[in-house]
Image (cartoon, rainbow, N blue to C red):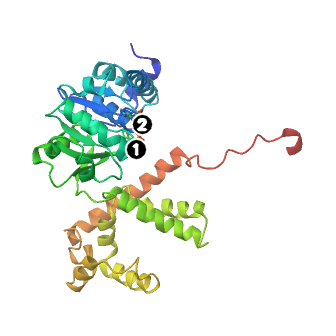
Amino acid sequence: MTTPAADEAATAPTHVPSGSPGDGAGRQIAVVGAGYMGGGIAQVLGLAGADVKLADVSAAAAHASYDRLLTEAGQFAADGLFPADAVERLTARLQASDSIEEAVAGAEFVMEAVPEQVEIKHPILTRISRANTDAVIASNTSTLSIALLAEAVEGAQRFLGVHFSNPAPFIPGVEIIPHERTSQAATDLAVAIVAEAGKRGAVIKDVTGFVLNRLQYALFTEASRLVEEGVTSAEEVDAIVRTTFGFRLPFFGPFVIADMAGLDVYAACYRSLQQTYPERFATPRALAELVEGGHLGTKTGGGFLPLTAEQVPELISYRNRAYVRLQELLDELGPAPTQPVPAESDGDAAG
Ligand SMILES: NC(=O)c1ccc[n+]([C@@H]2O[C@H](COP(=O)([O-])OP(=O)(O)OC[C@H]3O[C@@H](n4cnc5c(N)ncnc54)[C@H](O)[C@@H]3O)[C@@H](O)[C@H]2O)c1
């Protein structure tokens, strides 16, 4: 039976945050570590139709996670963030297990999402790999080397990183990180499961920080320096990021942005930046080579990406519509509640 709120959600024009029901049907998956990330991943995979068994530090913890995930799914559905029938679908697909061994038995894919400590992950990965000698095993680690974690896996060729972002139900991108000995079949299975969940997977190499955190932390380092140098406040850095180049990022990555700006323009900016910050802002070799070769981005029909001059009018039109629509969305949502809540005003004093 659906609630009135769920009925409302059913008619609301909301985005379904995961694959259509059935995309992952028939998959047998285990999530070990059903906390914040593991729980969200279980919801995503369950909504895509996979059977997902949850394991945690104890049977009680796994059952508590199961209850929490269904309650949360009900709230998300009522808020129009999950499909209206999310609770029914997840009730049919999720199952709490009494042990890791019980959860992984018969699974073709095991997602490990225990805390980010090698001392915790290593014994858990050994346990998982001994309990199921066939399954592909993936870690959701944000920062640990996949090759290092693979040392604990019996059959390291079936191990890789599958890095969902927080909050897993709503962030579309997933990094897929084979280490040097990961088999192609293991990578292919991870790619398929991520796609069935309606996510955008990207297969990358096993380097510290992967791609997401290398970039995110580079930005954070520079943002922190600006505040430490007294250039401006943390609030103003955030505002500048949100309202200038950050405004482009939902639509365009750094290479499209550079190609659209003009690589000669970028090279000129680097000349200026590297005079003051030679270690941090030396002109990237690839940029210098493209400029030397006369490849200046969209204006010459080719830069980092094969964008041609003919594509530019359409691209500009898309860009302008995208920015106007984004501003409309921001106006509709209102500012993020990052400001301190003002203290209750004293009516007498105020009057
Ligand atoms: N939180 C984030 O923003 C984020 C984003 C991306 C990736 N990650 C990664 O995801 C992983 C999990 O992070 P989280 O934020 O979900 O942590 P969390 O603390 O919310 O969840 C960890 C879960 O693992 C369980 N656990 C602990 N020891 C266990 C054991 N021995 N056996 C079975 N289960 C055990 C805990 O009870 C808990 O439910 C980490 O590797 C983290 O780096 C986190």
The residue at the point 24 percent across, 56 percent down is 206
Estimate the spatial distance between the alpha carbons at disc 2 and disc 1, rounded to whole Å.
9 Å
Task: Look at the numbered disc 1 and give the secondary structure of its residue.
Answer: loop
Question: Is residue 60 found left or right of 207 in the rendered image?
Answer: right
| Residue wearing tag 2 | 36
x and y percent of residue 237 in the render?
55, 64
Mark 2 belongs to which amino acid?
Tyr
The answer to the question of whether label 2 and label 1 lie on touching residues, with beta carbons closer than 8 A, is: yes
x and y percent of residue 292 in the render?
23, 86
Q: Is residue 258 above or below residue 68?
A: below
Q: Quadrant of residue 256?
A: bottom left
Mark 2 residue's CB less than 8 Å from ligand 1? yes
Mark 1 belongs to which amino acid?
Asn
Task: Look at the numbered disc 2 and give the secondary structure of its residue.
Answer: helix
Viewer-side residue, 312 vs 90 = 90
Mark 1 residue's CB less than 8 Å from ligand 1? yes
- Quarter of the image where the N terminus is located: top left
Question: Is residue 179 found left or right of 62 in the rendered image?
Answer: left
In terms of sequence position, does the residue under pointer 2 or pointer 1 come before the other? Answer: 2
| Residue wearing tag 1 | 166
Viewer-side residue, 119 vs 283 = 119
x and y percent of residue 133 in the render?
15, 33
